[in-house]
Amino acid sequence: MSISIPRGTQDILPGDVELWQQIEKKARQLCEKYQYQEIRTPIFEHTELFSRGVGDTTDIVQKEMYTFEDRGKRSLTLRPEGTAPVVRSFVEKKMFGFAKQPVKLYYMGPMFRYERPQSGRFRQFVQFGVEALGSNDPAIDAEVISLAMNLYKEMGLKKLKLIINSLGDKESRQAHREALINHFQPRIGEFCSDCQKRLEKNPLRILDCKVDRDHELMKTAPSIMDYLNVESKAYFDKVQKYLTQLDIPFEVDSNLVRGLDYYNHTAFEIMSDAEGFGAITTLCGGGRYNGLAEDLGGPETPGIGFALSIERFIAALNAEGIETKLNEGIDCYLASLGEEAKDYTVGLLQKLRLAGFSAERDYLNRKIKAQFKAADRLNAKYVAVLGDDELKNNIINVKNMETGEQVEVALDSVVEYFQELQ
């Protein structure tokens, strides 16, 4: 009986994984420039972290989490997102006491959500995200957004659209909340059961409903913009000013509601405008979450961050037809003729690798012609051919695969020869 891969997961094979590695490398390099440091949190956490941190009215907590009970009867959940674990670690490890403030972190790793698999969306997916904790400066909102935009741009994406909104501070959100309840309550029976439950708990989440998004009350729902107090409006104006200063185009959409309960003030999404990308155009989402650290037992700490899916990143690259140079080839392929020469290449291969060169040899006892074909498949810059006669004479023939030029090199100085070529 054959065993197949679980639905909603994928194997990333050689030939494909190199693009993943390139994106991950670019993300790490960019974070270094922005002074964000890596944090690694557990794959699973106590379920309460997500029900409290993400919000028990969200689809993630209600429908999508992989939750299980361990042998100690503890409820644990495979992490569905990265912010709550990072903030949990921030509080637990007392990072608010670090000398370097704000604390700027990034993470990269698998997340898990039980949802319907579709193009660019999996049940196990890889997220890259950043979190900046400890600053109320709207300039860091702009910085976080610029980091995400620059990552996409440095990989060649051009058809991007940034949407921003303000969810306001606690006072503004409360006023908007009451207006939403008054708006939806008379006809809430026409909405789905989820929306009916959200009316009192978190009516803002009704605006994010995919089932009732075409209902006429959605179009006339009170806008958060009409309920922003002076402080919230000034904050949002500053964010827009800084984005303009950074030459980052944006659109304000008062209907943008992030799917997690902890957001306030700045909320944003980066979307793909590429033709044929698909119905779900969001590549990246994030926002400010002042209050989350307090909810998880820490001191009052402002924070902002974003998360993006590597899978959707790659889908956007494909939609724009962007080809990236992945296989730069190896430095040298060792071809051998004769048993003694073949045995000698084992040690020579090791010397080349320890000297910093990428190198390979034949392991299938192929003829010399087949060995050259193998070198071509590996895009080898040079092929070094060693036969039993050459071994006795302490020489090796090195062929430049681009020019076809071939030279005879002393076998005991072949490593130095390649070092001089660099």
Image: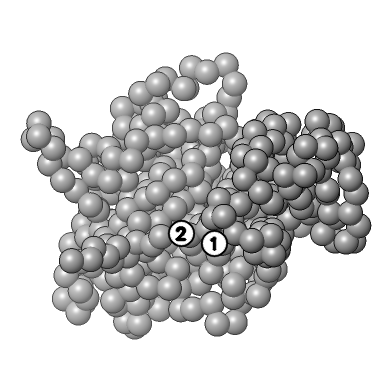
Residue 140 in view (yes/no): no
Q: Is residue 394 left or right of residue 176?
A: right
| Residue corresponding to mark 1 | 16
Q: Residue at x 40, y 49 (%)?
A: 110
Residue 287 at x, y percent in the picture: 50, 50
Is mark 1 in CB contact (under 8 Å) with mark 2? yes
Q: Amino acid at mark 2?
A: Ile
Residue 172 at x, y percent in the picture: 43, 50
Residue 66 in view (yes/no): yes
Q: Residue at x 53, y 42 (%)?
A: 130
Q: Nearer the viewer, residue 372 or 140?
A: 372
Residue 43 in the image: above or below residue 100: below
Q: Hey, which quadrant is residue 240 in on the image?
A: bottom right
Quick one: SS at disc 1? loop
Quadrant (top left, top right, bottom left, bottom right) of the C terminus: top right
Residue 241 in the image: above or below residue 343: below
Q: Hey, which quadrant is residue 104 in on the image?
A: top right
Residue 93 got which mark? none
* Few, some or many residues within 10 Å of mark 1 (<14, 14–19, 20+): few
Q: CA distance from mark 1 to mark 2?
A: 6 Å
| Residue corresponding to mark 2 | 12
Quadrant (top left, top right, bottom left, bottom right) of the N terminus: bottom left
Residue 198 in the image: above or below residue 87: below
Q: Amino acid at mark 1?
A: Asp
Q: Is residue 86 left or right of residue 274?
A: left
Q: Nearer the viewer, residue 210 or 320?
A: 320
Q: Is residue 420 left or right of residue 333?
A: right
Q: Nearer the viewer, residue 25 or 394?
A: 394
Quick one: SS at disc 2? loop
Q: Residue at x 64, y 74 (%)?
A: 320
